[in-house]
Image (cartoon, grey):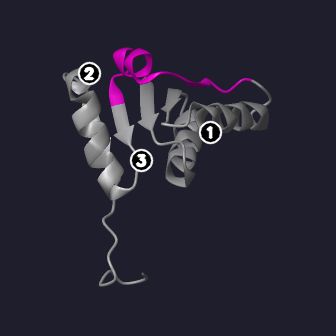
Amino acid sequence: MHVTIIGPGSMGRALTTRLLAGGNVVSLVGRDRRQAEEVASELRAGAGGSAAVDAAEPGTAIGKSEVVILALPYPAALDAAREHGRLLGGRVVIDVTTRWTRATPGW
């Protein structure tokens, strides 16, 4: 399965690692393309160069994915959904956002 993860930060990296271990193909998308490329490169290197992960532009990545995961901070996830809403139609969208506040245990 092809999965796009919007958000190449720590949560996106962790999810990508598990998805690759399961034999999936992953495209990473981020506002900072360089960060997405660095994460993809590190994960490929860690897998001996054989991991099926790349950094891509949103339109390209989402267009070839069955599943899109939003791995972003709360406000950014809303922005991404609005920005890419047209592209997300017909895909499974998973939002792993947790809204942290001072009242949240562990804050």
Q: Give the residues in magenta.
A: 50-67
Residue at 43 percent across and 20 percent down: it is 61
Classify 10 Å Cα crowding around label 1: few (below 14), some (14-19), many (20 and above).
Answer: some
**In which quadrant of the rendered image does the N terminus lie?**
top left
Inter-mark Cα distance, 3 to 1: 14 Å
Was residue 59 drawn as part of the magenta stretch in this picture? Answer: yes
Taking 79 as reference, is 24 above or below it? Answer: above
**Percent position (x, y) of residue 35?**
62, 39
Residue at 39 percent across and 56 percent down: it is 73
Q: Which mark is first along the chain, 2 or 3? A: 3
Residue 24 visible in the picture? no
Q: Considering depth in this image, is 102 or 62 the residue closer to the camera? A: 102
Q: How many marks?
A: 3
**In which quadrant of the rendered image does the C terminus lie?**
bottom left
Residue 42 visible in the picture? yes
- Which disc, if any, is residue 35? 1
Taking 79 as reference, is 92 above or below it? Answer: above
- Which disc, if any, is residue 87? 2
Residue at 47 percent across and 21 percent down: it is 57
What amino acid is at disc 2? Leu
**Percent position (x, y) of residue 31?**
48, 36
Badge 1 marks a residue whose secondary structure is helix
Badge 3 marks a residue whose secondary structure is loop
What amino acid is at disc 1? Gln
Residue that label 3 marks? 71
Inter-mark Cα distance, 2 to 1: 22 Å
What amino acid is at disc 3? Ala
Residue at 22 percent across and 36 percent down: it is 82
Q: Which mark is first along the chain, 1 or 3? A: 1
Was residue 44 drawn as part of the magenta stretch in this picture? Answer: no
Badge 2 marks a residue whose secondary structure is helix
